[in-house]
Image (cartoon, rainbow, N blue to C red):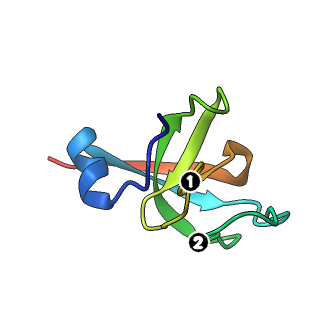
Amino acid sequence: MEVGCYTLAEATAAAPFLDYAVCLDDSARPANHSGDWPVQGRAYPVRVVESRLEGIPLVHVLTFVGEAPYYNAFAPHRFQITHRLYLN
């Protein structure tokens, strides 16, 4: 089963940190994509999760909502992780 749309609360309950990433590539939105889409140059709170469907790590944007099968997940080439914030 793939990871669904993580909220910020669910993500921080699973691990005590948040990663932030900048969108590097917002081109080539698939025609069948339903839900939020990142904007190039903007930073987002993310969680990188291994995809069982794709077999690669996908970047889940924690403030986005999307539909199955990818929910709020995007290919790693679209983002660059910029920093990690530990929640004490």
Kind of residue at disc 2: Asp
Point out residue 51 in the picture as x, y percentages from the top left corner: 57, 33
Residue occupying image coordinates x 38% and y 54%: 6
Q: Which residue is mark 1?
A: 68
Does dot 1 land on a helix, a strand or a loop? loop
Does dot 2 land on a helix, a strand or a loop? loop
Point out residue 42 in the picture as x, y percentages from the top left corner: 60, 71
Is residue 54 positioned above or below 6 on the image? above
- Label 2: few (<14), some or many (≥20) within 10 Å? some
Residue occupying image coordinates x 24% and y 57%: 9
Work out whether residue 86 can be spotted. no
Point out residue 63 in the picture as x, y percentages from the top left corner: 43, 67
How many circles with numbers are drawn on the protein? 2
Kind of residue at disc 1: Ala
Residue occupying image coordinates x 48% and y 67%: 65
Which is closer to the viewer, label 1 or label 2?
1
- Which image quarter: residue 25? bottom right
The reply, left or right, for residue 13 in relation to residue 33 is left
Q: Which residue is mark 2?
A: 36
Work out whether residue 77 can be spotted. yes
